[in-house]
Amino acid sequence: MRPLPAPALAALCLLALPAAAAYFGLTGREVLTPFPGLGAAVVPAQGGAHLKQCDLLKLSRRQKQMCRREPGLAEILQDAAHLGLLECQFQFRQERWNCSLEGRSGLLKRGFKETAFLYAVSSAALTHTLARACSAGRMERCTCDDSPGLESRQAWQWGVCGDNLKYSTKFLSNFLGPKRGSKDLRARADAHNTHVGIKTVKSGLRTTCKCHGVSGSCAVRTCWKQLSPFRETGQALKLRYDSAVKVASATNEALGRLELWAPPRPGTPAKGLVPRSGDLVYMEDSPSFCRPSKYSPGTAGRVCSREASCSSLCCGRGYDTQSRLAAFSCHCQVQWCCYVECQQCVQEELVYTCKH
Ligand SMILES: *[C@@H]1O[C@H](CO)[C@@H](O)[C@H](O)[C@H]1NC(C)=O
């Protein structure tokens, strides 16, 4: 049996990551080294190396074929996984579930809000990374955004290579395989959330222009299509996570197939609704993530803010207080001319961590 399209993507983006702590914070160039089983010194940059990389990623047969045909893609897939991971960890840095790798595969099998976020952020990261890779010349098969609709405006010139979202979304739908009707509610929800990720990147596409001409006359403008920074996409997805819609399944009588359906919440007069295409959807209430489980390492040892987050983050277990010395710049003076000279001061600062 072929794996379902949407789960295959998340598996690629999230399970392909080796669960080594050394993975965090590496740059795009170094991201190849944590491919498991290759040791530190191998992985030449060209030649058939990308075939080996494709074998190491968790891909369906069709995806592996695409990967092998396109040098550079394996690396882009890795970069996308890395981008999605870092963004997820940033957006959830203050939450009980902090997007740690531990427990990730358990989460992906369930239908929690967190599962929904993982699917969406993975597809968003891949869409974003591919579109950027095109404009940066990292892919043989695509280049800049060609934006035919904008060429007609005469004062505009297309000088800068725009992010190629058109190629990227086309590639992605091909990569995920054709949409197939499925009886399974989970598969439908996963596909829906994957699509929310793609859509969120799309809605962040902007036309950016720069003026040329005598002091601000703007006689000539150079314009290009530019994706918003991925941080903004991450923020938008986090908001959608906060307002995610719980769904059940219902058979659409007219179409005779299963649809996602959000039952009315108790106390609201409305009948059930089909979730909007921008809503993240989930099926099960999340665990508390307070204690170690197969979904997360729990919150013991997490650093918290006494005013803001300790009470919720530590789940009522309380927190330990430690003091440490922190260095900062002080007594700064402007020197003639023109730099600022500072001294280093140290100050005691308190660090709060959740108790076990
Ligand atoms: C997430 O929390 C766990 C403890 O619950 C901690 O070990 C881990 O370093 C945290 N991860 C990140 C990325 O902050």
Image (tube, rainbow, N blue to C red):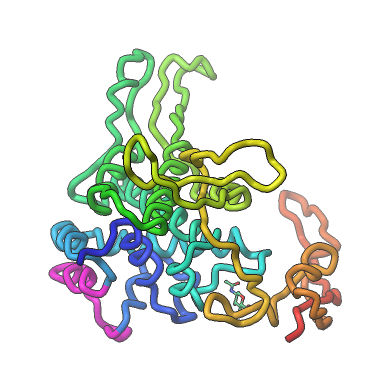
Q: Quadrant of ligand 1?
A: bottom right
Task: Please give the count of numbered marks on the rendered protein.
Answer: 0
87 vs 314, left or right, is left
Residue 295 in picture, x, y percent from top left = 54, 75
Q: Nearer the viewer, residue 215 or 105?
A: 105
Q: Is residue 226 left or right of residue 338?
A: left
Residue located 31% across and 62% down the image: 8
Q: Is residue 129 magenta?
A: no
Which residue does the image show at 52% across and 44% down from the upper left? 279
Q: Quadrant of residue 65?
A: bottom left
- Residue drawn at x 35%, y 66% is 11
Residue 300 drawn above or below residue 312: below
60 lies left or right of 48 = right
Q: Quarter of the image holding residue 319?
A: bottom right
The relative height of residue 269 versus residue 312 in the rendered view (above or below) is: above
Q: Is residue 43 magenta?
A: yes
User: Is any part of residue 35 visible from this angle?
Assistant: yes
Foreground residue among 49 and 186: 186
Instruction: State the residue lying farthest toward the front.
Output: 253
The image position of residue 98, as x and y in percent, is 60, 68
Q: Which residues are magenta?
A: 37-56
Assign the N terminus to one quadrant of the image.
Answer: bottom left
Q: Is residue 249 left or right of residue 267?
A: left
* In front of the other: 300 or 93: 300
Place of residue 266 in the rendered image (x, y in percent of width and height, measured from the top left) = 68, 48
Q: Give the residue at x 27% y 41%.
A: 167
Looking at the rendered image, the quarter that the C terminus falls into is bottom right
Residue 30 visible somewhere in the drawing: no
Query: Can you give x and y, in whole percent of width and height, for residue 188 in the image?
Result: 38, 52
Name the dominant secondary structure of the magenta segment.
loop
